[in-house]
Image (cartoon, helix red, strand yellow):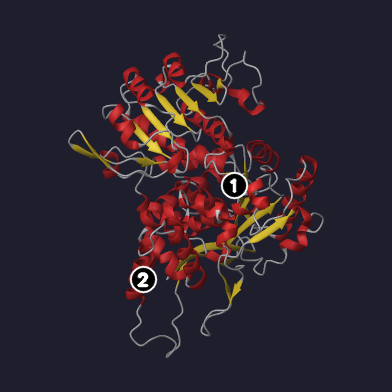
Amino acid sequence: MTVVLTPYWSAADGAQKLKLEAQPTPSPAEGLLPPAFSRDVHHQRVLLQLRSKTSNIEKYIFLSQLKDVDVDAFYHLCLANISEITPLIYTPTVGDACLQYSQNFRRPEGLVRSSPWELVFLLSMRQFISIKDKGKIGSILRNWPAINEARISVVTDGKSVPVRSRILGLGDLGLNGMPIAIGKLSLYVTGAGIRPSSTLPITLDLGTNNQTFLDDPLYLGLRQRRASEADYDEFMEEFMTEISRVYPKLLIQFEDFSTDHAFSFLSRFRHRFPLFNDDIQGTGAVVLAGFLSAARLSPLQPREHRILFFGAGSAGVGVAAQLLSFFTLNGMSEEEARSHIWLVDSKGLIYDGRDNVTEYKKVFSRKDYSGPPMTDLLEIVRHVKPTALMGLSTIKGAFSEAVIRRMASQTPRPIIFPLSNPVQLSECTFSEALRASGGSVLFASGSPFPTENFGGRRWEPGQGNNMYIFPGLGLGSILCRASSVTNSMVEASAIGLANSLSWDERALELIYPRIERIREVSAHIAVRVIRTAQAADVDHSSDLRKLTDEELLDFRSKEDVESSVKEKR
């Protein structure tokens, strides 16, 4: 069986609402399957087929096709082998999937007619809306055949440029950015139990400035340069207005917009519609959670921490803004908290006397430095004396042995988070950080790294994967029918994640929970998000206000999730 969001009628409010409950999978009619077929053996067969593929992109294609033909087997595979499957359906493999999307495209995914014993249902459909649809976006959105099903949409325009503006670092993808939206929504199902047919991936095709794609005869997107800013603004206003009309119960997650658009659209729409930007807020929340966990392991007091960011695109500035909460939660004013954060972009340390500082970075511009431009990271580390170093630059090897050694000489437990994806763009590896620091490092990365043996013990790296945040943040927002996703709700998701570490995980000095506990963690986060939405009075599901925290967790119970996996084995 599968755990899904199911509508129910609330007599108290006189309205239809949603609840999470287990839903059995219908049995096939006799004679429609081979006589010795069993789900248990079939899941073993599918896993062996997956592991027979020799490259990650081949595995990604296999899993995409599996989701088309057997969605239950796909999500069973994800849940039962989550640490193996997640890197294949999301980062780092999704990067190659984007770059090769037009070449590997099989067919449009749409309504799939299932076996006769089942109804027609939706399997991972997707929508493409282009600048040429301007003026008729509402009618295009209404072509989706399951309007009443949609609860969560990941929307991208595929314009993650310049490369260092986004943590994934893939450049202008154009329409080829669709796998990012699809991958994120697969993780909503895996991580939070949301019904697959309630997910809606959307790519906004505004053209592309990537000449390689424009010259590619197989490219599926518009063969034109990016639309003008004026046309783009009008398009987005129409899109957001119409999507809220067509899908009034939909939560929107913005994904992989360019830096300027990421900030401007979030600011422009967040108080009008239920939405959040995962690159800015989700990344910020997962890093805040990791920093809260790391700070517990450090002998320093909260006021002694000094955080240096190497990389100041949308993700970097978004994370810096979120990490202000670490200091404000410990009694500092926001202004005092800002004094504990330094930013470095491609032109060096950001300070008031420097020319050509982009507007959105100025909030963290230093007022206590007036010397010549400082561009060398080792020099900056000597000057700032940070206790924590955050990498969001997509510059491989930026955290050199000399930089890490300097960090370790200045603070007893250096917090080093190379957060850039994919692996080949990470600022350093776990092995490099561990050995250069002599084992004192508190480490988390954006990409997965293997465990290491060093100093007579086994070390496990932390991975600051947004998957820890957005399923629970989205689930809580959907269940309480939040009219907006407030800063306090994002902060609550980070605190919920930091507090979800088990005692065993804390004893091992883990920065994040084991990914195998993702549904339990997401449920814990969702409760915190719901309570915070209620406190901010942005919730519209009054029934949930009557439940205790324990009853909310029962609403999305660990036992139901475990039974769904067991029954599929």
Task: Tell me if mark 1 has few (under 14), some (14-19) or many (20+) residues whose alpha carbon lies within 10 angstroms of its own.
Answer: many
Seen in the image, is 63 located left or right of residue 562?
Answer: right
Seen in the image, is 171 located left or right of residue 547?
Answer: right
Q: In the picture shown, does residue 356 fall above or below 140?
A: above
Task: Tell me if mark 2 has few (under 14), some (14-19) or many (20+) residues whose alpha carbon lies within 10 angstroms of its own.
Answer: some
- x and y percentages locating residue 236 in the rendered image: 74, 47
Mark 2, residue position: 43
- x and y percentages locating residue 117 in the rendered image: 51, 84
**Which quadrant does the C terminus fall into?**
bottom left
Q: Is residue 540 visible?
A: no
SS class, disc 1: loop
- x and y percentages locating residue 279 in the rendered image: 56, 41
Tell me what residue is drawn at x 59 percent, y 47 percent: 255
Residue furthest left as drawn: 456
Label 1 or label 2, whichever comes before in sequence order:
2
Residue furthest top as drawn: 371
Tell me what residue is drawn at x 54 percent, y 11 percent: 368
Amino acid at dot 2: His
The number of numbered discs placed on residues in the rendered structure image is 2
**Which quadrant does the N terminus fall into?**
bottom left
Tell me what residue is drawn at x 48 percent, y 19 percent: 376
Mark 1, residue position: 255
527, 544: nearer the viewer = 527
